[in-house]
Image (spheres, rainbow, N blue to C red):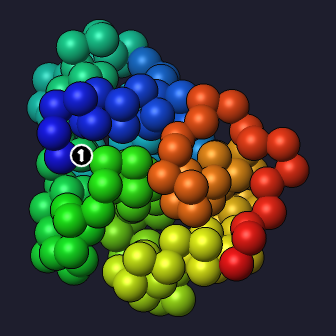
């Protein structure tokens, strides 16, 4: 992912995940203890000696590491994701960050459609998921971006896929 696209992804994730300097329980079932920008403390505890509230530098370090891990897992499971245009790379990375790559891999219809370049079908499959119901506005933005190749900073008005 090029530096400009990475900066846009980071901004997207900060908006979508929020930024927290102290641990909180997220909305997952069961709830997980989370800090920073969606950093799951159950999967990856804070480094030794770190205390909360975190500093901006610590939040940024966690996010950088989490993104590197996400990208490495995407490269291993979906090597073709890097051939997508920047907007659709951000959609895939955002979903993988939110769901985990294992969770993203359950979107078989959507991923197959993305790989074929059938973006409206991919968006429709994404929209027709429990994930879309759970994350609401985030899903609306990401589905629109997948279909149209344009990332909006606001929720599209009553987005429905054209597939």
Q: Is residue 130 visible?
A: no
Q: Is residue 122 visible?
A: yes
- Quadrant holding the C terminus: bottom right
Q: Residue at x 84, y 43 (%)?
A: 157
Q: Nearer the viewer, residue 34 or 62?
A: 62
Secondary structure under tag 1 reads: helix
Left or right, residue 143 beside residue 68: right
Left or right, residue 138 beside residue 108: right
Q: Residue at x 60, y 80 (%)?
A: 121
Q: Nearer the viewer, residue 116 or 31?
A: 116
Q: How many marks?
A: 1
Give residue 5's quadrant in the image.
Answer: top left
Asked if residue 20 is positioned above or below residue 84 in the image, the reply reads above
**Residue assigned mark 1:** 67
Give residue 9's quadrant in the image.
Answer: top left
Residue 49 in percent (x, y) is at: 14, 23
Crowd around label 1: few <14 · some 14–19 · many ≥20 (10 Å): some
Left or right, residue 37 beside residue 54: right
Residue 96 in percent (x, y) is at: 39, 61
Left or right, residue 1 beside residue 149: left
Q: Residue at x 25, y 36 (%)?
A: 6
Asked if residue 57 is positioned above or below residue 105 in the image, the reply reads above
Give residue 10's quadrant in the image.
Answer: top left
Q: Residue at the right extreme?
A: 158
Asked if residue 66 is positioned above or below residue 78 in the image, the reply reads above
Residue 7 in percent (x, y) is at: 28, 28
Residue 36 in percent (x, y) is at: 39, 29
Q: Residue at x 44, y 36 (%)?
A: 13
Q: Nearer the viewer, residue 16 or 147?
A: 147
Asked if residue 12 is positioned above or below residue 55 in the image, the reply reads below
């Amino acid at each position: 992912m090029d530096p400009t696209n990475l900066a846009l992804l980071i901004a997207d994730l900060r908006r979508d995940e929020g930024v927290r300097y102290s641990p909180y329980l997220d909305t997952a079932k069961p709830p997980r203890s989370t800090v920073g920008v969606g950093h799951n403390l159950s999967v990856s505890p804070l480094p030794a000696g770190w205390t909360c509230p975190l500093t901006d530098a610590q939040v940024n370090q966690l996010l950088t590491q989490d993104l590197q891990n996400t990208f490495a897992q995407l490269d291993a499971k979906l090597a073709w994701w890097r051939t997508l245009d920047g907007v659709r790379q951000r959609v895939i990375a955002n979903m993988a960050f939110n769901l985990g790559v294992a969770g993203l891999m359950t979107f078989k219809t959507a991923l197959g459609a993305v790989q074929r370049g059938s973006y409206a079908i991919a968006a429709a499959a994404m929209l027709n998921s429990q994930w879309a119901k759970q994350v609401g506005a985030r899903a609306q933005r990401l589905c629109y971006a997948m279909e149209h190749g344009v990332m909006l900073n606001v929720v599209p008005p009553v987005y429905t896929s054209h597939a």
